[in-house]
Amino acid sequence: MDQYLKEQKAWIDEKIYKKINEFTSEGRLRDSIIYSMKAGGKRLRPMLMKATFESFSDSDPLYVSPAVALEMLHTYTLIHDDLPAMDDDDMRRGRWTNHIEFDEATAILAGDSLLTMSFELISSDPSLSSEQKVFIVHQFSRAAGPKGMVAGQMWDMQYEDLEIDVDTLKRIHSNKTGKLIAFSIITGGYLAGLEEGKLQKLKEIGEAVGLIFQIQDDILDVTGDTAKLGKATGSDESNLKSTYPKLLGLEGAKQEKQKYERRVEELLGDLEADETPLADLIGYMSQREY
């Protein structure tokens, strides 16, 4: 799996930097965009899209532009999350955040560029039909917008430093993290030609994987190895954030994650996809150590 992840990340990075150079012309803006794109990250969202497609189809890869667009949009959210008006972070993955390395205005414009570029990339892809473009853009905008990620970010800020219950925490993370992960899996299946009933199962898988990913993040903040994580553990508690271990206890958080893992296994079995790249990647995300 380590070799697989390394190969997939190299493939995605090559596509990303090629497209950024094609779609941007202003030097400082491009430098700012590339700075954040190179700040690290596993590229798990585009990997999920690619793995889903390859689990159900061996035809020409139609997922390239949507996968690159998804990572662009994800990076835009990180740039804007770090801004003084949001989380006000100076460091991300051991490097200065964009607004510190450049300046606040440039960081905002870099994020804006990645957001809009992601939709241009999909809509201008000659390998996608008009029908496919409309489907993908519709799903993408819903997952990223005020019925998805943006809503999750808003709730995350509103409930900061407040006592919340598990259902509220689930609602925050289902939107802030889960919707884009679900989009990656649904889009991979759609481009592979799956019919509506199977796409609905993939949607449920994606939503569950989003929660698995977040719960594992929370668990690692308590139990993780600082050297592997690349950041200090215990930051959620020191920042007074509500997390699954805080609300359920560490063992309760693990049991909550296992509940979603069992449902994913069941759905993958229904789709006859329990021995596929998608199943392997989900298994890694669930058990990852960083």
Image (tube, rainbow, N blue to C red):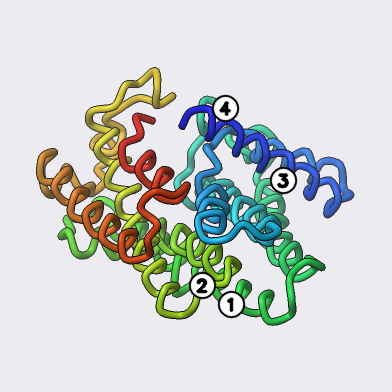
Q: Does residue 10 appear left or right of residue 56 in this picture?
A: right
Q: Does residue 87 appear left or right of residue 191 in this picture?
A: left
| Mark 1 → mark 2, Cα distance in angstroms | 18 Å
Mark 4, secondary structure of its residue: strand
Q: Amino acid at mark 3?
A: Ile
Residue corresponding to mark 2: 194
Q: Earlier in the sequence, mark 3 or mark 1?
A: 3
Residue corresponding to mark 1: 138
Residue corresponding to mark 4: 95
| Mark 3 → mark 1, Cα distance in angstroms | 22 Å
Q: Position of residue 88 (x, y in %)?
A: 48, 43
| Mark 4 → mark 3, Cα distance in angstroms | 20 Å
Mark 3, secondary structure of its residue: helix
Residue corresponding to mark 3: 16
Image quarter of residue 37? top right
In this rendering, the label closer to the viewer, 4 or 1: 1
Q: Earlier in the sequence, mark 4 or mark 1?
A: 4
In this rendering, the label closer to the viewer, 4 or 2: 2
